[in-house]
Image (cartoon, rainbow, N blue to C red):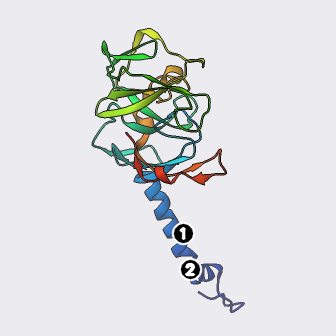
Amino acid sequence: MTNIFSGKPTLWERFKASGMRSLIVLLLGICSFRSAVADWNDVPSGSMKPTILEGDRVFVNKLAYDLKVPFTEIHLAEWANPARGDVVIFYGPDDGVRLIKRVVGLPGDHLQMVGNQLYINGQAVVHDDDVKLVSADYNKENPSGGLLAEEQLGQHEHPIAVQSWSEAMRDFPDGVTVPAGHYFMMGDNRDDSRDSRWFGFVDRKLIVGQALAVALSVNPSDSYKPRWQRFLSPLP
């Protein structure tokens, strides 16, 4: 409606004519999709090396386990729970920071660790015995080197890194039992990961979704050059 005193279009009429309404609806749709369906997550730290490197951007399936109201943690439906070995995105229970780790312990599991050897319900996690010293480095970027091993968690066979020179929590021989509705998370870079060994169990409702693949990757230590070989690579 035109202002009868000035003969000029109203602010609302100018807004509709400008096409901004369609743009706002489009942006709301995109944001809602990213909030509830699928998103990507930048990785700033090396706690998941060698599986995920700094500068990776991983694809996150937010419908892997449930459906939430966009922009909230309200569950509308739930059809699955995280499996052992899944790489998941979640909010840290102590500070709310968004993190990416691997699911190690499920509700009811009893976990122990002795000399970096993980035990689940009294059984040692299967890994190769040929743990080898990597003389250059375990991810082709860190000149300080490390140890690599393959570990089997559920259906996921994946690498882990060990840095014997760093201060880390490698032992809790008495073990812990994961309470109902919670999970125990660990980074693949076992000696350089702030995970459930430090901040405790993760409530199911804090889990955002499952990380499935590296969508794209850049090298922050080399002028952010693309790591083409990591584009669209699935996570083990």
**In the image, farthest residue toward the front:** 135
Look at 71% across and 90% down and name the residue there.
Answer: 5
User: SS for tag 1?
Assistant: helix
Kindly tell me whether residue 115 is visible in this rendering: yes
Residue 53, image x and y in percent? 53, 40
Quadrant location, the C terminus: top left
Q: Does residue 208 sit above or below 202 in this rendering?
A: below
Q: Distance between the residues labelled 1 and 2?
A: 9 Å
Q: Which of 194 and 206 is in front in this view?
A: 194
| Cβ atoms under marks 1 and 2 closer than 8 Å | no
For residue 70, say whether it is visible.
no
Q: At which x and y percent is residue 185? A: 44, 28
Considering depth in this image, is 158 or 209 the residue closer to the camera?
Answer: 158
What amino acid type is highlighted by mark number 1? Answer: Ile
User: Label for residue 19?
Assistant: 2
Seen in the image, is 94 located left or right of residue 125?
right
The circle on residue 24 is 1
Give the side of residue 92 with respect to residue 103, left or right. right
Is 78 left, or right, of 230 in this rendering?
A: left
Q: Is mark 2 on a helix, strand or loop?
A: loop
Looking at marks 1 and 2 on the same chain, the residue that comes earlier in the sequence is marked by 2
